[in-house]
Image: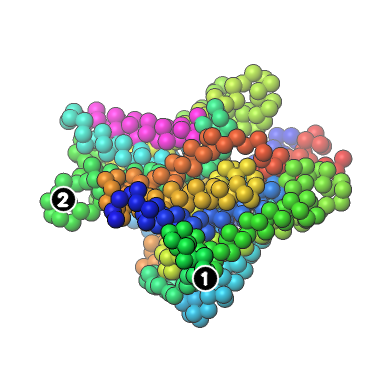
């Protein structure tokens, strides 16, 4: 077989593995549903209809896919650099808080504030990912554990701010004290694309960024070095690449993307910060990136698929009374199967290396 | 009475810390077995949530506490088997597979809670405190140390037991050799995969029990995500311990003490916002990870073992 064709088939094979993993997870889901006394066919039909069944569902799916895509791009960059970013949840939260803080408290009432808010969310996410990144680079501190801890710290920070300094003044007046910020000023909103739905320009931004991330990772020196560090840090060091710098950079970039996801969610969808703004996007973004083979462009369809599952999960709950935690369970299984199946693609690439 | 520095307050905090160390001890010692054999199990958090729910549900239905702990252990064993299948047999990236197992466990426990209990927070009669005669009557110290439930005492007993298993038995030697130099162990006829399966399963059982301590030996109710990151802290604690059971004990006490202090500060109405106080354990984890040198780590930690055939 000509080499080019063989590479093509190998790429197809790599792309198909996550699909099989998902089908296997859905198959196991059948038994879970049966054990819970629910009709699996009705449940999966509700899931599919809810996520992809009509135009309204597709728009909802796209709205959910946007933060997933942004987080997923960040996960791709970090994983390609050989560092594991589990801190998406926390980075989304601080990104959302930063965007809201700039929107509410900077007294410049102009459209220019919208991009500034987005930049603030990226900066906050970059700091939240950067702390584990720099600890990893300078002191070899395990980044998985630090990013997880940064998630918990962000949750409590947000609880504190939303109940204290940043609480909506109306909530205090009314005496309801719901933990949320005031409505942001309208000039900071992302433009809605299809009112009355919440679809907004954030989706376009996410798509553009996935192309930029692809170019950065695969067509620039920085991206080449990040990937080299991820593939073989010893060889990279001998080649003169500053390994710690690129590990930290990968985590900082990953954090910035997740922070931006928080900013887009606030400026585009919610228009204020509420409790649980991260809505599990941080973890589901990991599944998304894995499904997309850690490729920024592959992450686009993956985000759409998992956005659909998240939307469909709500319909599942409403119509078949299967709680949407079923989706979280499925996503966990998909992660297990995708990483479990990697042994097959590794074996093949080894065989390729031996057979030439 | 409301003085932080009165003897009653201090020993109150110590007593609370002794109890709160329980899940850290079970999960941390379990993770110690995992890591000593070279496996890194981030699924602990998910296993704990499943253990917490299953123990609670069994006790709610049968009022049999022993059965509750047993079921939590079996569920932990099963999830340990899943983890070892993925990370030992399929040689997956252990960090990510652990996160997958946690997502699965947290998700499934929520799903079961919503389906079997309609998401209602209920309470059960958990393990009763056992006053150890004479010792418990010592002023202050007695109450703090010798008036706890059986699961607390067992947790502390597990420290010397783990020490003996890991450092005084042939099995322990095999476990440590598999974590340090799997090639050499393999050459000497030690089955690397079998030892790793065993350790990840021990870790799973202990993590399951750690979860059960939340729902039937301390708070005695079940809530979604009630373990609140304890599983991850347990993993960090093993780094802190220098991979020694005694170190796990010290780490567990340090974290539980900070937790108890944080809870007590709120009760005493000291003017720190509770949400800020609740960050403490997590900040402490990062700080300890920074200051603890990981030079004692098992050399093959998180590296899947593959025989080189040629």
Image coordinates for residue B27, horizontal then vertical, percent: 57, 56
In the visual, does B263 lie left or right of A137?
A: left
Q: CA distance from mark 1 to mark 2?
A: 53 Å
Query: How many residues crowd around disc 2 within 10 Å: few (fewer than 14), some, or many (20 or more)?
Result: few
Image coordinates for residue A25, horizontal then vertical, percent: 57, 60
Q: Looking at the rendered structure, which numbered label has been put on residue B133?
A: 1
Q: Residue at x 63, y 59 (%)?
A: B158
Q: Residue at x 12, y 51 (%)?
A: A173
Q: Quadrant of residue A57?
A: bottom left
Would you place residue B141 above or below residue A68 in this image? below
Quadrant where the C terminus of chain B is found in the figure: top right
- Subunit of mark 1? B
Query: How many residues crowd around disc 1 within 10 Å: few (fewer than 14), some, or many (20 or more)?
Result: few
Q: Say what secondary structure mark 2 lies in.
A: helix
In the visual, does A194 lie left or right of B33?
A: left
Image coordinates for residue B17, horizontal then vertical, percent: 46, 55
Which residue range is magenta in the image? A110-134
Q: Quadrant of residue A31?
A: bottom right
Q: Say what secondary structure mark 1 lies in.
A: loop
Q: Looking at the rendered structure, which numbered label has been put on residue A172?
A: 2
């Amino acid at each position: 077989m000509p080499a080019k064709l063989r590479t093509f088939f190998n790429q197809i094979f790599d792309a198909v593995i996550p699909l099989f993993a998902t089908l296997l997870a859905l198959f196991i889901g059948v038994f879970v549903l049966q054990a819970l006394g629910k009709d699996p066919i009705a449940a999966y039909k509700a899931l599919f209809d809810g996520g992809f069944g009509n135009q309204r569902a597709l728009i909802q799916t796209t709205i959910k896919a946007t933060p997933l895509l942004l987080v997923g791009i960040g996960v791709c960059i970090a994983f390609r650099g050989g560092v594991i970013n589990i801190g998406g949840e926390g980075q989304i939260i601080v990104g959302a808080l930063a965007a809201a803080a700039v929107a509410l408290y900077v007294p410049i009432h102009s459209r220019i504030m919208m991009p500034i808010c987005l930049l603030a969310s990226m900066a906050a996410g970059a700091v939240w990912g950067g702390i584990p990144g720099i600890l990893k680079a300078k002191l070899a501190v395990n980044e998985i554990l630090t990013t997880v801890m940064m998630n918990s710290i962000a949750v409590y920070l947000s609880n504190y701010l939303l109940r204290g300094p940043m609480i909506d003044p109306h909530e205090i007046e009314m005496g309801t004290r719901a933990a949320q910020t005031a409505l942001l000023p309208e000039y900071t909103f992302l433009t809605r694309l299809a009112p009355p739905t919440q679809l907004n320009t954030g989706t376009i931004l996410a798509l553009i960024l996935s192309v930029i991330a692809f170019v950065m990772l695969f067509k620039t020196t920085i991206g080449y070095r990040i990937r080299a560090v991820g593939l073989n840090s010893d060889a990279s060091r001998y080649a003169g690449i500053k390994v710690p710098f690129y590990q930290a950079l990968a985590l900082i970039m990953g954090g910035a993307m997740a922070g931006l996801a928080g900013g887009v969610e606030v400026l585009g969808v919610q228009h204020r910060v509420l409790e649980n703004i991260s809505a599990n996007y941080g973890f589901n973004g990991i599944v998304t990136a894995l499904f997309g083979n850690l490729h920024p462009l592959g992450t686009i369809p993956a985000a759409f698929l998992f956005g659909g599952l998240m939307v469909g999960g709500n319909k599942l709950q409403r119509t078949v009374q299967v709680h949407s935690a079923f989706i979280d369970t499925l996503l966990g299984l998909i992660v297990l199967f995708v990483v479990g199946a990697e042994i097959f693609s590794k074996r093949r690439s080894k065989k390729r290396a031996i057979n030439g | 009475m409301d003085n932080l520095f009165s003897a009653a307050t201090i020993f109150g905090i110590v007593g609370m810390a002794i109890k709160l160390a329980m899940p850290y001890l079970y999960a941390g010692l379990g993770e110690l077995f995992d890591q000593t054999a070279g496996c890194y199990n981030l699924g602990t958090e998910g296993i704990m949530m499943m253990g917490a729910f299953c123990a609670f549900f069994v006790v709610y239905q049968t009022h049999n506490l022993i059965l509750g702990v047993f079921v939590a252990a079996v569920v932990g064993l099963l999830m340990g088997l899943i983890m070892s299948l993925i990370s030992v047999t399929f040689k997956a990236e252990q960090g990510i597979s652990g996160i997958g197992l946690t997502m699965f466990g947290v998700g499934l426990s929520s799903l079961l809670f919503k389906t079997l209990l309609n998401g209602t927070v209920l309470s059960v009669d958990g393990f009763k405190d056992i006053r150890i005669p004479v010792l418990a009557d010592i002023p202050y110290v007695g109450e703090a140390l010798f008036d706890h439930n059986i699961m607390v005492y067992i947790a502390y007993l597990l420290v010397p037991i783990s020490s003996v298993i890991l450092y005084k038995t042939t099995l322990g030697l095999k476990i440590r050799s598999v974590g340090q130099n799997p090639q050499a162990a393999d050459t000497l006829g030690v089955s690397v995969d079998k030892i790793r399966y065993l350790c990840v399963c021990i870790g799973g059982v202990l993590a399951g029990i750690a979860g059960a301590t939340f729902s039937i030996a301390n708070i005695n109710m079940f809530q979604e995500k009630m373990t609140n990151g304890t599983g991850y802290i347990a993993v960090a604690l093993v780094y802190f311990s220098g991979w020694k059971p005694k170190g796990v004990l010290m780490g567990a006490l340090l974290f539980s003490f900070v937790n108890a202090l944080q809870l007590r500060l709120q009760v005493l109405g000291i003017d720190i916002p509770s949400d800020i106080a609740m960050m403490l354990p997590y900040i402490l984890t990062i700080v300890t990870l920074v200051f603890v040198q990981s030079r004692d780590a098992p050399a093959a930690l998180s590296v899947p073992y593959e025989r080189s055939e040629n």
